[in-house]
Amino acid sequence: METLSTASLRHAFAAYPTGMALVAAAVDGRDEAMLVNSFTSVSMDPPLISMAFTYSSTTWPRLRRATVLGVTILGEPNSALVPQLRTAGDTRLAGITLDGDGDTGARTLPDGAANFTVRPHQHIPAGDHELVLFEVLDYRREAHTPLVYFDRRVDTVHLERFQA
């Protein structure tokens, strides 16, 4: 077993492929958004998902103030946006149009594999992260292939590999 270090543990975690999601909302009249790869379905009754946010994030404290958020599961048409969405600061959303719900402030990307409208249900301290359970208020699934984050790279699911 390898010695526990931040770098080696991060490398080991990277062996597990995940999807990529964008969490977004209008907060104080400004669109805020951040990428996450910790999206997980949790429960059907009530409908819950979870995501984890590092305490060192500068974006999560602003998004945390939103009462309703949008979550986009990134799809293949969103792949060109990933390098920009990974950046910090004001350039993250420069030139990117988010779809929005004027009543709730939830924001989503067009052409995602799926979109969810959620509200925070429970906040749980979890080491250097905050684990948040969100109640699903609405959702939409599209016919786009999802993006996958694996070994610090972004790719698509190659469905032909899984077809019999």
Image: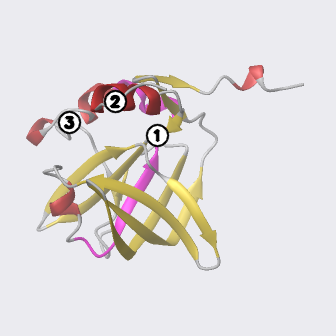
How much space separates mark 1 and mark 3, taking CA atoms? Answer: 17 Å
Does 73 appear in magenta? yes
Residue designated by label 3: 95
Residue 4 coordinates in the image, percent (x, y): 35, 32
Residue designated by label 2: 82
Q: Identity of the amino acid at label 1?
A: Leu
Q: Identity of the amino acid at label 2?
A: Val
Numbered mark located on residue 126 in the image: none
Residue designated by label 1: 74
Q: What's the residue at 42%, 56% (across, down)?
A: 71
Res 109 seen here = no
Residue 119 coordinates in the image, percent (x, y): 39, 74
Q: Which label's residue is closer to the chain start, 2 or 1?
A: 1
Q: What's the residue at 54%, 70% (across, down)?
A: 48
Does 24 appear in magenta? no
Q: Which residues are magenta?
A: 66-80
Residue 36 coordinates in the image, percent (x, y): 37, 45
Badge 1: few (under 14), some or many (20 or more) residues near its Cα, within 10 Å? many
Camera-side residue of 53 and 112: 53
Q: Are marks 2 and 1 in contact (CB under 8 Å)?
A: yes
Instruction: Give the structural element (helix, strand or loop) at label 3.
Output: loop
Q: Is residue 60 left or right of residue 151?
A: left
